Amino acid sequence: MKQGTGTVLVTGANRGLGLETCRQLGQLGWRVWLTAPDAAEGPRACEALRSEGLDVHFALLDVASPESISRLAGRLEQQGIRLTALVNNAGIAMEGFDAHVAEYTVAVNFLGPLRVTERLLPLMEEHGRIVMVSSALAELKDYPHSLQRRFDPPPSKERLVALEWSFVEDVRAGVYADRGWPESAYRVSKLGLNALTRLLAEELEPRNLLVNAVCPSWVRTQMGGPHAARSIERGADVIVWAATLPPEGPTGGFFRNRRPVPW
Ligand SMILES: NC(=O)c1ccc[n+]([C@@H]2O[C@H](COP(=O)([O-])OP(=O)(O)OC[C@H]3O[C@@H](n4cnc5c(N)ncnc54)[C@H](OP(=O)(O)O)[C@@H]3O)[C@@H](O)[C@H]2O)c1
């Protein structure tokens, strides 16, 4: 293995930015754990990268399922795997807006990264990197002060989880607008993810782990659609950059085009 490389696990990696992140890190000489929630699509994507000569392994992972996360962690532990980097990439932007959409979006985009990170933490090497794939739609400047104050400064992890659930409950009760929430579960889930990034960065600093959120910009994936401005290759660049930061690299930041952006 080349110097400066290691083992990375990427969530939601059977297509889109996750798959491209696996490819680029594999090309840099990393051993890659490509994870995906589908038992057919995941292995197919893994095979495609192997046929390009890359060191890629597949593991099933549905980030919305604590059981699935636990099974994966158990498997990695059994094999004595240590992780140099973890990329929380899996994400959804569902059609429509109701309590189900709110609950499932928060489960995948916010609780998923929280649970995956906490469960895989014991496997992380010192100076490891944790990357949260976020969005410009989580930039606080675009929200009213009343909403900004709920996420900035971030409350404790427990309060943050309760805050995300209060959004789901407010949608269920039909009072989300009165309570100042935007009509977008995706936005609220990524606001939570950014606040979580800040909390984890502080918590994990004593372990020398670097935790950062990145925005890939608007990218031509299934989620971004065919008219997005950026190619998948360029979109993955900032993710790969954050996964390969040197030990003295930044932590607790939000980055686009490899440059910091305000929360
Ligand atoms: N594309 C953009 O313009 C853009 C902009 C800003 C941020 N982002 C963020 O970038 C990340 C990747 O997005 P993308 O554009 O590559 O989207 P994508 O092409 O729609 O891919 C999403 C990936 O997440 C997986 N996924 C969905 N639910 C999951 C679950 N419960 N457990 C594990 N994996 C799950 C999907 O698996 P299946 O194939 O099985 O559904 C797929 O592999 C997301 O976090 C997204 O929010 C994207």
Image: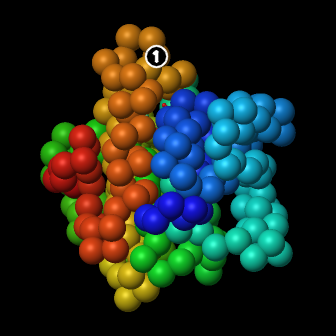
Q: How is the image coloured?
A: rainbow
Q: Secondary structure at mark 1?
A: loop
Ligand 1 closer than 8 Å to label 1 CB: yes
The residue furthest top is 227
- In which quadrant of the rendered view does residue 83 lie? bottom right
Please give left or right for residue 130 compared with residue 179 in the image: right
Q: Is residue 76 left or right of residue 133?
A: right
The residue shown at (46%, 72%) is 128
Horizontal and vertical percent for residue 18?
A: 55, 40
Name the residue located 64 percent from the left edge and 73 percent from the top edge: 82
- Give the quadrant of residue 91: top right
Tell me, yes or no, if residue 100 can be seen here: no
Residue sitting at 42 percent across and 77 percent down? 127
| 170, 149: nearer the viewer | 149
Whole-percent x and y of residue 70? 76, 67
- Name the amino acid, label 1: Gly
Picture quarter with ligand 1: top right
The location of residue 183, given as percent across then percent down, is 39, 33
Q: For the C terminus, which image quadrant?
A: bottom left
Give above or below for 93 relative to 71.
above
Q: Name the foreground residue: 200 vs 73.
A: 73
Residue 248 position within the rendered picture, expressed as x and y whole percent measured from the top left? 27, 74
View extreme (front): residue: 2
Mark yes or no: residue 116 visible.
yes
Which quadrant holds the N terminus? bottom right
Residue sitting at 52 percent across and 35 percent down?
20
The answer to whether residue 28 is above or below residue 114 is: above
Q: How many marks?
A: 1
Considering only vertical position in the picture, is 148 above or below 197?
above
The residue tagged 1 is: 225
* Local crowd size for mark 1, using a 10 Å CA cut-off: few (<14), some (14–19), many (≥20): few
